[in-house]
Amino acid sequence: MPSSPPVPDHGAVLAEVRKVRRAGVVRLRGLDVPVLAGVARGVPRGDGELPGGPVEKVLRLAVSRMGGGTLQTAAEYSLGLAQGTRDWPASDRRRRAAQVYGVSVERFRKHHELMVLGQVAEQVVALHRDGTPGGAENSPVPYDRMPAAHRTLHVRVHDRTVPVTLHVHSVDLVRDIDVVVSPTNIYFALPAPYKSSVSATLRRAGAHRDPVGGLVEDRIDDELRGWTARHGAPGRAAQPGTVAATSAGVLDGQGIRRIYHVAVAVPRPETNDYDVQPADITRGVARVFALLAEESGRHDPPLRSVCLPLLGAGRGGLTPLESFGALWAAVEAELARGADWEIHFVVRRHARADLLERLLAPRED
């Protein structure tokens, strides 16, 4: 019986993984990575070959075994394995990986990157050690359970503990929360409903449609236009941090009762880009709570719960850490004065939920 090939040295694998990080998978075929190539020879080819050849398959298998969360997401961005990042420069991939951990690029380079790539190397070694051609061991390690889409945290705020719920899904799947906060620009002009932003998603989900999907009433957009008309602001920029309230349209069938539109995005002239300032987010969220207190008693039952996305963390250009820091400044101030609102946050990706969970975790003295 032929002897098994020796298990590759972790340090040698790590050196080659770092080489791939610098070059990116688009240049993988031209790289001299003999250790990774040796591991690839023991992995079945499958039904087709990836653009980067067998070595790319090894890296993807290794990363898929990392169990999800921030570690796997950062590894995917670092190596250019995340969707749409194959041709990104190394600096852009590093910047996005740093955002996953909510740290500066320099701190990520010095502290997190080696840990992330080291874990990739560990999985490559394990893949070589555990895998047998054609065996089930060559498949990615499955999750023992799906990551929770709803996480309840118990957060210490001054002298009391308050529950905070994280929702990890699209905002239109939120249910039984009185108020959902939606970011918008200072003109209160909603994006087209086919787009993917929070405000576009809420507009689309709140519209009334006929049985075959035809638009009957664009209710949230119509109400927001009415709000700007009543306040003498159609076509005129509002102050950043201004809040406008509308109904939730047909989302009221999911228990959503109000949408609070917070003007935080300032368009850059003659571009499609926006600027968002953290101070405007804090100011806007503080006004959300003021409006919530004003409106609560007008409803039966009173409004009690509010759900916040990471304002400005999309096209606004803020990192998730910057956005949440600005949000939490207003939320913490409201809770510190004794308010008993039910606080919810909604994010699309588990990596961002992991970041929020770490930021809200109790600090050890």
Image: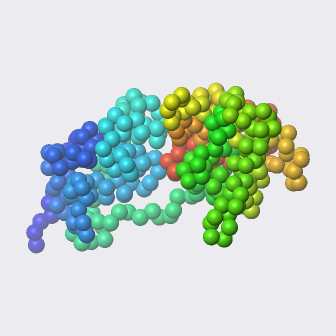
Please state, as top left, top right, bottom left or bottom right, where the N terminus lies in the image. Answer: bottom left
- Report x, y in % for residue 50: 25, 59
Query: Taking 131 as reference, is 87 above or below it?
Result: above
Residue found 80% across the figure and 41% down from its top: 292
Residue 244 quadrant = top right
Asked if residue 154 shows in the view, the reply is no
Query: In the visual, does 217 lie left or right of 2?
Result: right
Q: Quadrant of residue 241?
A: top right
**In this rendering, is residue 170 above or below 131?**
above
Residue 260, position in %: x, y? 73, 43
Q: Position of residue 313 (x, y in %)?
A: 54, 39
Give the tally of numbered discs: 0
The image quarter containing residue 39 is bottom left
Residue nearer the viewer, 127 or 108: 108
Residue 31 visible in the current orientation:
yes
Name which residue lies at 54% across and 29% down: 268
Image side of residue 136 versus residue 6, left or right: right
The answer to whether residue 92 is left or right of residue 291 is left
